[in-house]
Image (cartoon, rainbow, N blue to C red):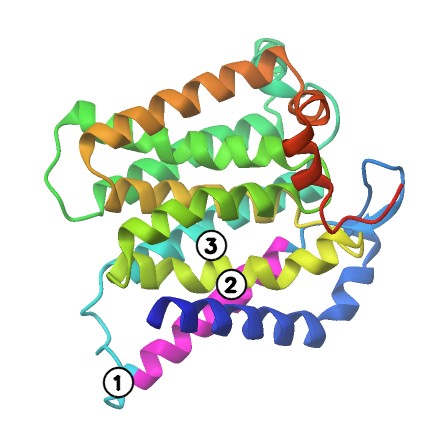
């Protein structure tokens, strides 16, 4: 029940922030063409980050007055908030300054050999740095190999979800599918409760994303992927984490070779789920 309450609070918080800051979406700097050539505001994932910040501020204030956990007793929530803000910042830079040139990891590396640091490569390197900080701050003593492996898992999760963000609502749907088994494993423990408002905030943006009123952008996809990766590292045992890491590596490599959109369109169940709730062409 605590997890569902967190999800609901996240939904309400992001709707409040979106309603209050709706005029921000009209800023010309945020306008981008979507997959159909329609110009929409991007980087709307920043509203989810702001919503989670409001929720966490409220939790801290209420805890200080004896309603809920006292501030400082739950070390997971600051980690989740750190992931939201930092991954959101990297994604926001990409949404504002990124171009269609030098796409993909190989494209970013080629650009670097020409002496050009792309926003995409900055996002990848920054994501790796954030992941290392998160794993190193988790509180458990781990070996160097384990720290690197868990950091790679978080960074790849953030990057991979960003690669799915090629159609309205797709990234959020993929995140929800990944969140369900994590939520079942975590239950009402601190990790499950901490990520619930994040999931709720993006659920609150799903309808507008599907109706092509906005795009969560790299800002939103990077936050969602990073938080889910962090949750997996904190909640799942070493063996299953290794399995998740292998899957993430394989999917990341596959993304360089094939189009996820084409694969989804060729598999009827995936195509149905992908198009569910989306505006007709």
Is 163 above or below relative to 139? above
User: How dense is the environment of label 3, judged by Cα within 10 Å: few (below 14), some, or many (20 and up)?
Assistant: some
Q: Which residue is labeled 2 in the image?
A: 200
Question: Closest to the observer: 278 or 81?
Answer: 278
Q: Which residues are magenta?
A: 45-62
User: How dense is the environment of label 2, judged by Cα within 10 Å: few (below 14), some, or many (20 and up)?
Assistant: many
Quick one: SS at disc 2? helix
Q: Which residue is labeled 3 in the image?
A: 85
Q: Earlier in the sequence, mark 3 or mark 2?
A: 3
Quick one: SS at disc 3? helix
Confirm whether the magenta stretch covers residue 58.
yes
Q: Which mark is residue 64?
A: 1
Quick one: SS at disc 1? helix
Looking at this rendering, what residue extends furthest in the bottom direction? 65
Q: CA distance from mark 1 to mark 3?
A: 23 Å
| Residue displayed at 75% across by 65% down | 24
Is 253 above or below relative to 242? above
Is 210 above or below relative to 3? above
> For this view, does 116 lie left or right of residue 184?
right
Kindly report which numbered mark, 3 or 2, lies closer to the viewer in this rendering. Answer: 2
Q: CB atoms at circles 1 and 3 under 8 Å apart?
A: no
Indicate the position of residue 272 as horizontal and vertical percent values: 70, 38
Position of the N terminus by quadrant? bottom left
| Residue displayed at 66% across by 50% down | 216
Looking at this rendering, what residue extends furthest in the left direction? 141
> For this view, does 240 lie left or right of residue 162?
left
Q: Is residue 121 visible?
A: yes
Q: Which mark is residue 228?
A: none
| Residue displayed at 89% across by 44% down | 38
Q: CA distance from mark 1 to mark 2?
A: 24 Å
């Amino acid at each position: 029940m605590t997890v569902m309450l967190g999800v609901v609070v996240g939904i309400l918080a992001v709707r409040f922030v979106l309603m209050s800051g709706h005029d921000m979406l009209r800023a010309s700097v945020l306008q981008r063409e979507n997959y159909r050539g329609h110009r929409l505001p991007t980087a709307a994932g920043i509203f989810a980050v702001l919503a989670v910040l409001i929720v966490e501020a409220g939790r801290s204030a209420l805890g200080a007055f004896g309603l809920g956990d006292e501030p400082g007793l739950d070390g997971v929530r600051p980690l989740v908030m750190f992931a939201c803000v930092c991954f959101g910042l990297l994604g926001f830079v990409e949404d504002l300054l990124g171009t269609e040139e030098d796409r993909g990891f190989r494209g970013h590396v080629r650009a670097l050999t020409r002496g050009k640091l792309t926003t995409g490569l900055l996002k990848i390197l920054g994501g790796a740095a954030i992941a290392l900080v998160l794993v190193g701050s988790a509180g458990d003593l781990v070996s160097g190999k384990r720290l690197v492996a868990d950091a790679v898992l978080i960074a790849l999760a953030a990057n991979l979800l960003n690669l799915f963000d090629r159609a309205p609502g797709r990234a959020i749907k993929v995140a929800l599918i990944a969140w369900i088994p994590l939520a079942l494993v975590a239950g009402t423990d601190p990790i499950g409760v901490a990520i619930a408002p994040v999931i709720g905030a993006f659920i609150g943006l799903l309808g507008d994303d599907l109706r092509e009123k906005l795009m969560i952008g790299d800002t939103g996809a990077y936050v969602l992927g990073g938080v889910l990766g962090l949750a997996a590292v904190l909640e799942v045992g070493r063996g299953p984490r290794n399995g998740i890491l292998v899957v993430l590596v394989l999917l990341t490599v596959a993304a360089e070779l094939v189009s996820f959109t084409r694969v989804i369109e060729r598999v009827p169940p995936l195509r149905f789920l992908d198009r569910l709730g989306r505006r007709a062409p």
